Amino acid sequence: MQVTVVILKPSAVQRGIVGEVIARFEKKGIQIVGMKMLCLTDEMLSAHYAHLVHKPFFGRIKDSMQASPVVVMALKGVDVINVVRQLSGVTNGREAQPGTIRGDYSVSVQENIVHASDSPETAATELKRFFSENEIFTYPQFFLPYTYANDEW
Ligand code: UDP
Ligand code: MG
């Protein structure tokens, strides 16, 4: 089992679709193991988007991510990092496939509703960045036998 980090961005919070987006992860069969609302600090964003810090548009991305509180989630499942990236769709909402979160709810590169960790390394780093150990829960998922075959997890 892997754990991945999703951020429901201000574009999700402000448009009132947080519940719908969370429902997509739940309906897929992914377990929520952590979730909270917070305001992203300058320090968090410089680390989180380190690969974009030197881009001329980093300022507007930062403003966008600080426009309101966000919801951060820790999601658990088999290959969940890839599964959640697939559910999210490609970065540009105008190019994201219909049926994906970005494809269904976004027409923007920046205002694209969700962040999702892109590798096991970033998932581990992001989990530590946004959650303390006591905010990540281990609890039985009672429908597990109906979610996976017993040799899949
Ligand atoms: N972004 C943007 N313009 C760009 C590239 C990225 O506004 O040209 C924003 C967008 O919100 C994106 C985030 O910065 O989701 C992080 O970019 P990344 O390339 O890591 O895309 P992601 O992993 O979110 O698909
Ligand atoms: Mg990324």
Image (cartoon, rainbow, N blue to C red):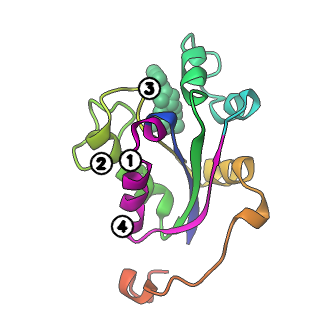
Say which residue label 3 marks.
110
Which is nearer the N-term, disc 4 or disc 1?
Answer: 4
* Figure check: 66 above or below 34: above
Q: CA distance from mark 2 to mark 4?
A: 12 Å
- Look at the numbered disc 3 and give the secondary structure of its residue: loop
Q: CA distance from mark 3 to mark 1?
A: 14 Å
Which is nearer the N-term, disc 2 or disc 3?
Answer: 2
Magenta stretch contains residue 96: no
Q: What amino acid type is highlighted by mark number 1?
A: Ser
Q: CA distance from mark 3 to mark 4?
A: 25 Å
Percent position of residue 145, x then y: 41, 89
Q: What amino acid type is highlighted by mark number 2?
A: Thr
Q: What amino acid type is highlighted by mark number 3?
A: Gln
Which is nearer the N-term, disc 3 or disc 4?
Answer: 4
Per the rendering, the mark at residue 100 is 2
Query: Does ligand 1 reach within 8 Å of label 1's beta carbon?
Result: yes
Say which residue label 4 marks.
28
Q: Pointer 1 and pointer 2: residues touching (CB < 8 Å)? A: yes
All told, the count of numbered labels is 4
Specify few, some or many for label 2: CA neighbours under 10 Å numbering under 14, 14-19, or 20 or more: some
Query: Does ligand 1 reach within 8 Å of label 3's beta carbon?
Result: yes
Image side of residue 149 versus residue 48, left or right = left
Say which residue label 1 marks.
88
Magenta stretch contains residue 33: yes
Percent position of residue 128, x then y: 74, 52
The part of the chain drawn in magenta is 12-38
Which is nearer the N-term, disc 3 or disc 1?
Answer: 1
Which is nearer the N-term, disc 2 or disc 4?
Answer: 4
Q: CA distance from mark 4 to mark 1?
A: 12 Å
Image side of residue 12 versus residue 61, left or right = left
- Between 132 and 120, the residue placed more toward the observer is 132
